[in-house]
């Protein structure tokens, strides 16, 4: 009787063990299925990540190529340095792929020649587009009823044509001058722009600037034309604020007068850039470097 009970109890325990084993096998199969699904999902995610990475690389390359093309276009519209009097030399070094600085010079007529430099607020595509548009307007004399021999009138017309409300809240500073060969007179006007630096043949140095806020900031502005006499051997520097707004030490900026004194030497734009970079330290300059030098 005891043997029968023992066998019955053993059989029951074996049955329980078999049931537990079957349950464990079922759970193991479920776990295995889940594992396989996870592996398959992981492989799918890896494939998606790989595809996304390739797409990202392709987009980055396309954008890089387009930025390069845009930068090449901006440089392509800059004038060639002049070999005849008035001779010119210049340097433009954007702080990013696309900057907001630009400049130009061209003959208005047989007796008048215009020189100008502008600086759009900010950097990037928007600033570059506004800069190029303004330069092309000046080159093509596309301001109605404007005497391009009168710098104040030119800046006034530009201010009317480029209100910041229609330019994504962007504005630009500018210096515009007209040299008359017959009289040696330089007429000029500026709109919130740094002074141009005139080094006379006798060694004296003058800063040329007129009052007026940046183009586009306020409607119905009128800009004033000033005059200066130019003689043979004089040199005129048109600059953007990025040429001198650098830190010479932590918290200390290069003083404009120190920059003017440096410009009074007979140095090329490249030599001035090397000096400014030496003050700034390693890395790119904080803003676009634009310097146009004119020798009369």
Image: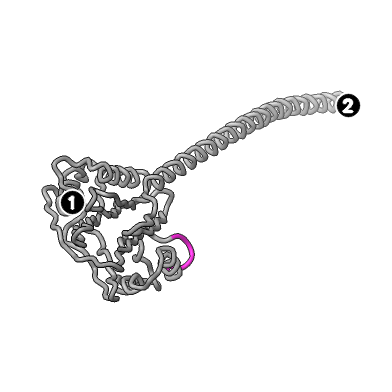
The majority secondary structure of the magenta stretch comes to loop
Image spot of residue 292 (x, y percent): 34, 59
Mark identifier at residue 3: 2
> Is 103 drawn above or below residue 235 in the view shown?
above
Where is the C terminus found, in terms of image quarters?
Answer: bottom left
Q: CA distance from mark 1 to mark 2?
A: 126 Å
Give the image location of residue 277, x and y in percent: 44, 66
Residue 9, position as x, y percentages in the image: 80, 27
Residue 72 as seen in the image, left or right of residue 202:
right
Q: Of residues 218 and 187, which is closer to you in this image?
A: 187
Q: Is residue 287 magenta?
A: no
Residue nearest the viewer, comparing 113 with 288:
113
Q: Secondary structure at mark 1?
A: loop
Q: Quadrant of the N terminus?
A: top right
Q: Is residue 11 above or below residue 64?
A: above
Tell me the residue at 13%/57% (across/down).
224
Q: Secondary structure at mark 2?
A: helix
| Residue extent of the magenta highlight | 280-284
Circle nearer the N terminus (1, 2) = 2
Residue at (19%, 58%) from the top-left corner? 189
- Judging by the rendered image, the residue that carries numbered circle 1 is 149
């Amino acid at each position: 009787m005891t043997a029968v009970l023992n066998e019955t109890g053993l059989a029951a325990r074996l049955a329980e063990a078999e049931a537990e084993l079957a349950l464990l096998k079922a759970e193991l199969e479920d776990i295995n299925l889940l594992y396989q699904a996870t592996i398959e999902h992981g492989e799918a995610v890896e494939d998606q990540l790989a595809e996304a990475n390739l797409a990202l690389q392709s987009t980055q390359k396309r954008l890089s190529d387009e930025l390069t093309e845009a930068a090449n276009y901006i440089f392509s519209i800059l004038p060639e340095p002049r070999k005849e009097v008035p001779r010119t030399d210049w340097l433009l070094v954007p702080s990013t792929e696309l900057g907001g600085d630009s400049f130009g010079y061209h003959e208005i007529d047989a007796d008048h020649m215009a020189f100008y430099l502008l600086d759009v607020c900010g950097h990037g595509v928007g600033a570059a587009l506004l800069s190029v548009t303004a330069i092309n307007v000046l080159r093509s004399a596309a301001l109605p009823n404007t005497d391009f021999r009168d710098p104040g009138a030119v800046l006034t017309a530009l201010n009317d044509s480029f209100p910041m409300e229609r330019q994504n809240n962007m504005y630009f500073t500018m210096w515009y001058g007209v040299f008359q060969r017959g009289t040696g007179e330089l007429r000029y006007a500026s709109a919130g722009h740094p002074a141009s630096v005139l080094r006379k043949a006798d060694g004296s140095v003058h800063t040329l600037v007129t009052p007026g806020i940046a183009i586009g900031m306020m409607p119905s502005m009128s800009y004033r034309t000033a005059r200066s006499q130019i003689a043979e051997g004089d040199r005129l520097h048109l600059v953007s604020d990025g040429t001198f707004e650098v830190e010479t030490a932590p918290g200390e900026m290069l003083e404009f007068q120190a920059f003017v004194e440096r410009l009074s030497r007979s140095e090329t734009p490249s030599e001035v850039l090397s000096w400014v970079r030496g003050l700034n330290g390693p890395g790119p300059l904080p803003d676009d470097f634009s310097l146009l030098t004119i020798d009369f």
